[in-house]
Image (tube, rainbow, N blue to C red):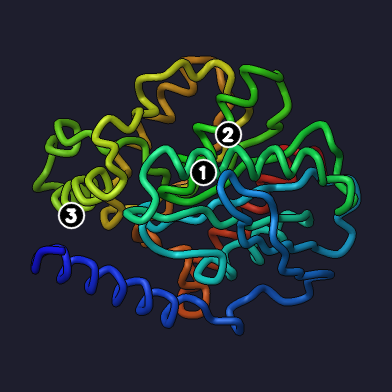
């Protein structure tokens, strides 16, 4: 390993530890949940860590699978514990947060393969949680939202309506440098471009498919929540929302001007994050007829 690779690996390890210290705060979990359970589910190459959250009176609400953000290189179900707990509580439903193999240790499409395996497991095991076995909800933030949206399209093309709803929080739409270069000096796009270059290199996937270049007609009703000037993906989110609507997809969009990219993790420190997750949860409940 070269000196540069050693330094990069060390920085990544420190970043991962720092994010866990900052975000994996058990006290930030939403109150009054009926159940929280850690488990392992089948992955593409090895078992995946998962955590199940259930609100009181979840009834026949479908199971929501949640995939965490972190640029495909950081974070896990612990750093996103608070987000998933608040989504479960505010939607009055059930959430299964699922981890996946990270880059650069696992190259693309390993992340997609794990997501696919998790979805298959969810359909096979939903009834054990009291949820319907014929439909689920997919959700995620940033890179996790990319995984959720990609898998939603794949599943609904094969089995229309199997994904009843998708919930995408400041989704990463693409890592194409030419598009990130647009408005590079505005709206924090210069930071986003640096991140996109690193993500693509870590994944070994400079050709990571853009969600702006695929047929979106199989997408279900979609909830999208994004940030303001400190959210570098917001221009791409606007383009993605426009493309969904052009494809005839119902989109409920919420924008939070004070929210930065990744800001929903900070429920311990930010009323904006808590209120946004409460609103998204209410939208989920409404879309699912509850």
**CA distance separating discs 2 and 1:** 8 Å
> Residue 174, how many percent across, how many down?
31, 35
Residue placed under numbered mark 3 in the picture: 191
> Residue 164, how many percent across, how many down?
71, 32
Q: Closer to the camera, 49 or 251?
A: 49
Q: Which mark is residue 107?
A: none
Q: Which mark is residue 222?
A: 2
At 57% from the left and 25% from the top, the residue drawn is: 154
Residue placed under numbered mark 1 in the picture: 168
For the residue labelled by badge 2, is the local secondary structure a helix, a strand or a loop? strand
Mark 1 neighbour density, 10 Å: few (under 14) some (14–19) many (20 or more): many
Q: Is residue 128 left or right of residue 14?
A: right
Q: Closer to the camera, 257 or 144?
A: 144
Counting residues from the N terminus, which is met first, the one under dot 2 or under dot 3?
3
Q: Nearer the viewer, mark 2 or mark 3?
A: 3
Residue located farthest toward the front when viewing the structure as drawn: 1
Q: Is residue 224 left or right of residue 58?
A: left
Counting residues from the N terminus, which is met first, the one under dot 2 or under dot 1?
1
For the residue labelled by badge 3, is the local secondary structure a helix, a strand or a loop? helix
Q: Closer to the camera, 114 or 139?
A: 114
Report which quarter residue 211 is drawn in.
Answer: top left
């Amino acid at each position: 390993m070269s000196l540069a690779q050693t330094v990069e690996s060390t920085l990544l390890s420190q970043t991962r530890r720092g994010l866990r210290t900052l975000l994996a705060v058990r006290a930030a979990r939403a109150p009054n949940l009926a159940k929280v359970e850690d488990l392992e589910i089948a992955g593409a190459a090895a078992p995946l860590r998962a955590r199940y959250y259930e609100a009181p009176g979840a009834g026949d609400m479908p199971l929501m699978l949640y995939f965490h953000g972190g640029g495909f290189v950081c974070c896990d179900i612990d750093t996103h514990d608070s987000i998933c707990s608040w989504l479960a509580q505010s939607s009055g439903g059930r959430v299964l947060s699922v981890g996946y193999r990270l880059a650069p240790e696992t190259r693309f499409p390993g992340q997609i393969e794990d997501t696919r395996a998790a979805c298959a497991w969810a359909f096979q095991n939903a009834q054990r949680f009291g949820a319907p076995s014929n439909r689920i909800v997919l959700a995620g933030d940033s890179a996790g939202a990319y995984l959720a949206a990609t898998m939603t399209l794949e599943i609904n093309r094969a089995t229309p309506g199997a994904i009843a709803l998708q919930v995408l929080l400041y989704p990463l739409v693409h890592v194409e440098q030419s598009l990130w270069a647009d408005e590079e000096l505005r709206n924090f796009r210069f930071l986003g471009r640096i991140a996109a270059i690193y993500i693509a290199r870590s994944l070994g996937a400079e050709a990571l498919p853009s969600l702006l270049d695929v047929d979106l007609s199989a997408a279900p009703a979609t909830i999208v929540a994004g940030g303001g000037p400190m959210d570098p993906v917001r221009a791409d989110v606007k383009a993605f929302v426009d493309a969904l609507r052009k494809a005839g997809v119902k989109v409920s969009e919420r924008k939070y001007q004070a929210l930065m990219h990744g800001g929903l993790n900070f429920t311990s420190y930010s009323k904006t994050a808590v209120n946004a997750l409460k609103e998204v949860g209410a939208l989920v409940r409404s879309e699912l007829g509850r």
